[in-house]
Every structure is written in structure tokens, then in C-alpha cells.
Amino acid sequence: MRFGPVPVVEAAGLISAHSVRRDGITLRKGAVIASDTAASLARAGLSEIVAATLEPGDVGEDAAAARLATHLAGPNLRVEPPFTGRCNLFAETAGVLTLDPAQIDAVNAVDEAVTVATLPRFKPVVAGEMVATVKIIPYAVPGTVLDRAGAAAAGGVLAVAPYRRRRVGVVSTRLPSLKETTIDKTLRVLAERLVPTGAEIVAETRVPHAAEAVAAALVDATDRAGADLVVVFGASAIADRRDVIPAGIKAAGGRVEHLGMPVDPGNLLLIGSRSDVPVIGAPGCARSPKENGFDWILHRLLADLPVTRADIVALGVGGLLMEIVSRPQPRAGGETAGDEMEPDPAAHG
């Protein structure tokens, strides 16, 4: 593509690089210059205009953006018509955005003319939400550059994994120090969290804070109520793999995949399973409606996306979400391993 000033009398058919207004004549940026417009501008005294000229093999900005966006779009994404070198992608269903960051980086590294911006990986989205945009910077890009950009990422690298697990069981353990009203509030908060996903609580059990009671409740939630995901809220935080909740999962014939997470609030989250049903040992911060690490894991499991130990340990960068006011500067010092200053279960992370 050539770019620069040209005589107005020779500008017909070229692309206007900038908006021009002269004697009631308006030529918009990016418009193809019509012959009568060029003649009118010349009569108005304009001698030259900055314009872009496509060369053989060039692909116009709109066509290039649409081509790349269509290549990147996978299941449950809608590609909107391009405009001014931009093509947007929208979720067609509620779910979790999946992508390969390395491949998106590779596309952006091909040439400064080609850019792709997305929401964060595993971001929960709703139907109609924009999840990515492809923007071609100049008015055209060589076809060879566009080919390289397409080759840098697999087709369909962007997708939305829809929510598939819809039946949630909840087990709450009791201790004298935990108020029933706290458990009631916890259930309301979780129900509100589930609304965008289409899931609902199908079983709710309150049991003593003991491994055998947790085990029986897990069996009941999965075998009788048919829950396809279970959340366990402990009256006391999980401090060790041998603590009540992990012991209860094992006693129910399940397994503990990972305890702990480099996300704060959310450090003391547990991931386990019983048969093919995921089990989350919820951190205390999950009692709060504010975003915390529990949200990240909950949405991925509801979308039936696996969460491995490697996935969890990779959450550290960006995992510091906020300070918790009810814990007076716990990260500033004086906190020992396993001591999370738990004045209120709802504030515990």
C-alpha cells in the first residue's frame, strides 16, 4: 500500500487518509474518493490530498479484519460485519471464554498492522458480550502478512465453553461458633452467583463438622439428589489435607486433587471429586458476594472445563485481588502459616 499526498485531480478511486472539509464538501476519513468529489475539491482550491493506494496483493482493512476474525472464531462465537478495519466477536451463549494466550501473542507479533485484543482467558461471559476484536491498523495489509497472521493461530482458537453442569449440591458444616444465619446468607450468595450460569442448588445439607458427616452428605448429594457439582462450606477453614473436609471427601470414596491456591482472597480452596462429580471445598471468602478465587474455579467447573494442579498454580500472577478490610493488614506481617485471622467465616479467604 502506498500512502502520502497526491494531486486532487488524480485522487479518484483512492482512499482518503484523513477527513477533509472545504466549501461545504465533506470527505470522510477512510472513504473511497469519488471522481465528482475530487473535482469539487479541486474547484474549491485544494491542490493535493493525503491518500492511500492499494497495491497488487493488498487486502482492504475491512476484508482483512473479517477474514482473520472468522479464522480465529470457534464454537459459540458470532463474528459481526467489519467497519473501519475492525471486526468484533461476540458470545452467543453464556459460558467461559477459552483461548491460547501464546497463539494470540503470536498473531500480534506477525506485523504491527494486525492486532487482536481479547477478554482474559477463562473470563465468564454472557450471551451478547463482546469477547474479542480484530483491528487492522492501516487501510490495507499485504495478503502475505494476513496469511502469516492466520497461520500463527489455529482456526477456532477463541471459543466459549457453555455452562454444562446445572445441578449444584451444597454441604455446610456446623460448629457452635457459626450462626445459622451465616449459612443462610451463604446459600443466598451462592444462588445469586449461579444465576448467570443457569445452574441451581438442588440439594442443601447442614451437618456436624466431622469427616463422617461430610462423607454421608456427599454421598447423598451425588447419589440421591443427582448433583453434578458439590460445594462444601466448612464451619472452620481447611488447614491441612488431613482436615475434616478433605477427610470427608476421601471417606465418601472421592479424592482430593489440590489444596490451596495462589489467589487472595481464595487461598484455602480445595479441589476434589467423587466419581465424575467435582467437589469444591470453599474458602471462607466464598460466603461474600465480592469476586474472589472461588468464582474463578466455580465457573470453569460449571463449564465442564478441567481444573488441574498446573492450572491452579498458574493463577498467581494477577491473583492478588484485593485487601480484606476485616483483616487488618494481614499481609503486612505477623501472619504465620495456617493462621489466617478468622474473626468471621464470611471474611476468611
Image (cartoon, grey):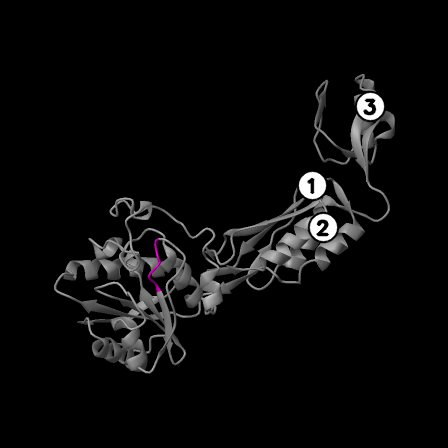
Asked if one can make out residue 20 in the rendered structure from this viewpoint, the answer is yes
User: Image point 24% across, 75% down: which residue?
Assistant: 214
Graded by Cα atoms within 10 Å as few (under 14), some (14 to 19) or many (20 or more), the crowding at tag 2 reads some
Whole-number angstrom distance, CA of label 3 to CA of label 1: 24 Å
Mark 3: secondary structure: strand
| Residue 122 in the image, given as x and y percentages of width and height | 49, 59
Q: Residues within 10 Å of mark 1 (few under 14, many from 20)?
A: some
Name the kind of residue labelled 2 in the image.
Val
Horizontal and vertical percent position of residue 335: 29, 52
Decide which of tag 1 and tag 2 comes sooner along the chain. Answer: 2
Q: Position of residue 184 (x, y in %)?
A: 20, 61
Q: Is residue 307 visible?
A: no
Q: Per the image, is 128 magenta?
A: no
> Which mark is nearer the camera, 1 or 2?
2
Please give the name of the residue rendered at 36% of the width and 59% of the height, measured from the top-left corner: 294
Q: Earlier in the sequence, mark 3 or mark 1?
A: 3
Judged by depth in the image, the label closer to the viewer, 2 or 3, is 2
Q: Quadrant of residue 35?
A: top right
Of all residues, the one furthest to the left in this rendering is 176
Viewer-nearest residue: 262 or 116 = 262
* Residue at mark 3: 48
Residue 267 is one of the magenta-drawn residues:
yes
Amino acid, disc 3? Glu
Q: Which residues are magenta?
A: 265-269
- Badge 2 marks a residue whose secondary structure is helix
Is 42 rendered above or below residue 334? Answer: above
Name the mark on residue 137: 1
Name the amino acid type tagged 1.
Answer: Ile
